[in-house]
Amino acid sequence: MTKISALLQNLTSELLKKLAVSMKAYNGSGLQIVTPIDGSVIAKLKMDGAGAVDKKVHAALEAFEIWREVPAPKRGELIRLLGEELRANKETLAELVTVECGKILTEGRGEVQEMIDICDFAVGLSRQLYGLTIASERAQHTMQETWLPLGPVAVISAFNFPVAVWSWNFTLAIVCGNPVIWKPSEKTPLTALACQALFEKALTLYTKTVGKPPQALSQIVLGNAKIGEHLIDNPAISLVSATGSSRMGAFVGPRVASRFGRTLLELGGNNAIIVSDKADMALALDAILFGAVGTAGQRCTTTRRVFVHQAIYEKLCTQLQKRYVQIAARKIGDPLEDGTLVGPLIDKASFEKFQAALKQARAEGGELLAGGKRVMANKYPDAFYVEPALVKMRKQTDVVRLETFAPILYVMPYATLDEALEAHNDVPQGLSSSIFTTDLREAEFFRRRSDCGIANINIGTSGAEIGGAFGGEKETGGGRESGSDAWKNYMRRQTSTSYYGTAKPALAQGVNFDVD
């Protein structure tokens, strides 16, 4: 073990201790947790077997029968207490996020802040689970639409946002009356254990101030894809919310549908920015850099394609090239250190896909303007730091249409906005999109023609707020999480008609059915 590895292992233990995680219950040998910072093992955990998963699902069902009857505002109070625990432990949890998934510390803090924000949103939501009163065509009848708790929810999360995406689902599910079973990525389970410990602290406070909630409102399943399959196959799981690749979603969606279960899928994104000749170039440049380089290109909303008006194409390419060279020279490194903007890729497999995509881009006529190399290999031989790659393409090719989960940005010229939007939409996914222009007509035309779930104007593709519904179309899965009316995913809709008269009620549509 190197000195750096020992320091990271000790840091991980200290962070878990601060977050009140009792590792004795989880220690084992089935699951090795590796920090991408230096590629060393920071923990070994035991995996759940099929029998353990079944017991957790049964416990969730028992919890549901109790929790569904608790008034929603009282359910919201539990989430308020969780938000307070997150506020008190923001820095510690953010640091653990950075150690486990490799994103820079400021992004780790942002991820925990996102959790706090969704807690606040869910608390308010607990008093706003509105139904409808509907006008009836029949006299002395009322129609109502009511939303009721759905049942146990399974959340499957990815490594790149190891805690925030869970919180989007968990807070709303709990407020809506449902227990949650969380299967985190096998690459980032330690942050899940930390969240569970913080929730248990919130439960203790809730018991003292409100009353004892049912056990098993929140449970964690540790394991690989096989144990995840066993979880989603259980017919007692009412909703499976899965975040990951489109390939994963193509497996999960039909599998759950085969038992008539519900899914909420948040999958891949091959996101693009269009830069008009009427754009504010300074705004566009900053947004492109954060979107393409942030989180080392490992966000579902990462900017992977840029279409630039031919009148400013060469100028923008030159400006981007200069910034990419600056980043490669000074801003790649340990994500725990101040000043770092680009941390490591998650693992070797990610690096190999990065290299393969660049090789294919060259073969398809691309010109590498900057980056593309592995760096810091002498200091971190088992970790994979890379220079973000900037590739000049004359047109959109097969490799550009492929989502590579790494920091590669393809820049292409366009002549007309129609042409740009045709290429923009010509990818399998439809998550996030953006245009930079000061022309109102162009902005509105783009907003109506983009086939993505997110269509931004004069801001980039990354950095969504929790107030809006988050998700996309096509192979992105069609799901919506977080804000707006995403809460409806976690409830079932019931329509009820009541008659309050004394005479024989009329039938709908004027149907006459007199027996006498």
Image: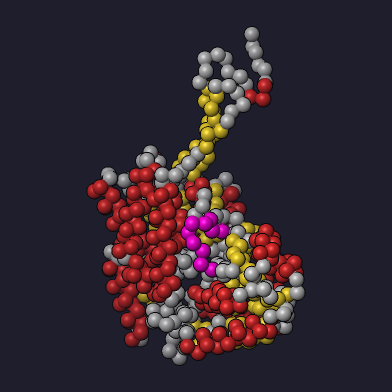
Residue at x 49%, y 74% (from the top left corner): 295
Horizontal and vertical percent for residue 19?
Answer: 30, 65
Image quadrant in which you'd find residue 445: bottom right
Residue at x 73%, y 69% (from the top left corner): 417
Is residue 229 among the parts visible in the rendering?
no
Most foreground residue, 502 or 253: 502
Most foreground residue, 101 or 211: 211
Which residue is at the far top?
516
Horizontal and vertical percent for residue 261?
Answer: 54, 47
Query: Predominant secondary structure in magenta?
Result: loop
Q: Per the image, is 188 magenta? A: no
Most foreground residue, 361 or 247: 361
Instruction: Count all numbered tags in the image, as a single digit.
Output: 0
Could you tell me which quadrant the C terminus lies in? top right
Horizontal and vertical percent for residue 240?
Answer: 51, 52
Could you tell me which quadrant the N terminus lies in? bottom left
Relative height, residue 95 to residue 210 (above, below): below
Residue at x 41%, y 74% (from the top left corner): 106
Relative height, residue 481 to residue 274 (above, below): above
Horizontal and vertical percent for residue 343?
Answer: 46, 79
Is residue 447 among the parts visible in the rendering?
yes
Which residue is at the far left?
208
**In the image, which residues are magenta?**
462-471
From the viewer's perspective, is 157 left or right of 201? right
Image quadrant in which you'd find residue 350: bottom right
Residue at x 57%, y 15% (from the top left corner): 504
